[in-house]
Image (cartoon, grey):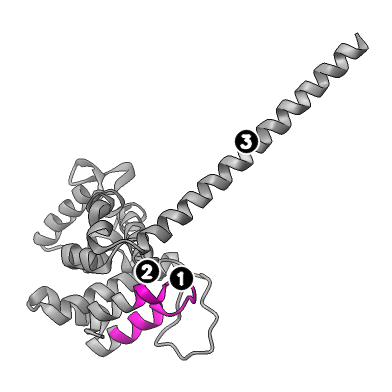
Amino acid sequence: MIGGSFILEWLNETVAIGSLIVTIISLTVSIFAVVLVIRFRRELSLSEQVANVPELLYREYIYRKLPSPIIIDGKELSTLKEARNAVRQQIKRGKTPEEIFYGKNSGLQNEFSYQVSVGLQHIGLLILMGAIPIKLVLLDIGLLIVEDWKYCSKLVKEELRENAPRLKTNKKLSEPIYFQRRHAEWLVHAAALYLHNYWEGEKVNELFSLLGDARTMQKREKELRKSEPGLVSDKTSKEIEKFLYNAN
């Protein structure tokens, strides 16, 4: 019996160790796979890179699913697209974004506005990492990106960045770079520059009241893009420069 108990204990320990080893191997493989995907996508041709981008944009941003439905004008809405359209209707009726999101009894600032800022952050980070091409994103939804910043910028600046960490730097910045939503802020400035360079009209003119003149937007875009060494590869940075500034 003593020998049998010893064998059982030995088998249990062996199984436990084996399970631990399998878990460690699985985690290692998963991390390695993610790194390979990002690195592989950076080396793809443009046609190969854009294959799955529309689906990604819809899932992570345009049609982003809300954690729980929100009520606007008595309607239960479950995606950013539905909520965005409802907000547009309220603006057409004369309400300002401040009244909609920060008016009496409004709870949208912690729901719709927050999820919009998350979507912008995800897309901005993916572009900077070289996972998706800036040209395709801005050609498709550049105007939407700037519009959504109007809906969430107050939340970002006054709530998410309250007592938030700031970037350590010896460089003189136009304003501090905060940890929260910094890649969203970069994306908005990049989209604004694209619109300023190639389009005109009332909505484009609104950019100046929202973000400042062209020189101010250019300076902030570069500050945000170059603030984290190692995040943006030389190849990706050159693609951004070429698209936004016609740089060779």
Q: Residue at x 29, y 76 (%)?
A: 240
Q: How many labels does the image show?
A: 3
Q: Nearer the viewer, mark 1 or mark 3?
A: 3
Query: Seen from this angle, which residue lies furthest left?
Result: 201
Residue 180 in percent (x, y) is at: 45, 66
Region rendered in magenta: 218-237
Which residue is the site of mark 2? 128
Q: Distance between the residues labelled 1 and 3?
A: 31 Å
Which mark is first along the chain, 3 or 1? 3
Q: Which residue is drawn at 55% across and 80% down?
A: 168
Q: Which of 98 and 44 is in front in this view?
A: 44
Q: Which residue is drawn at 9% across and 60% down?
A: 92
Density class for disc 1 (Cα within 10 Å; few <14, some 14-19, many ≥20) is some
Which residue is the site of mark 3? 22
Q: In this view, does 143 lie above or below 176?
A: above
> Picture quarter containing residue 43?
bottom left
Residue 189 in percent (x, y) is at: 28, 76
Q: Which of marks 3 and 2 is in front?
A: 3
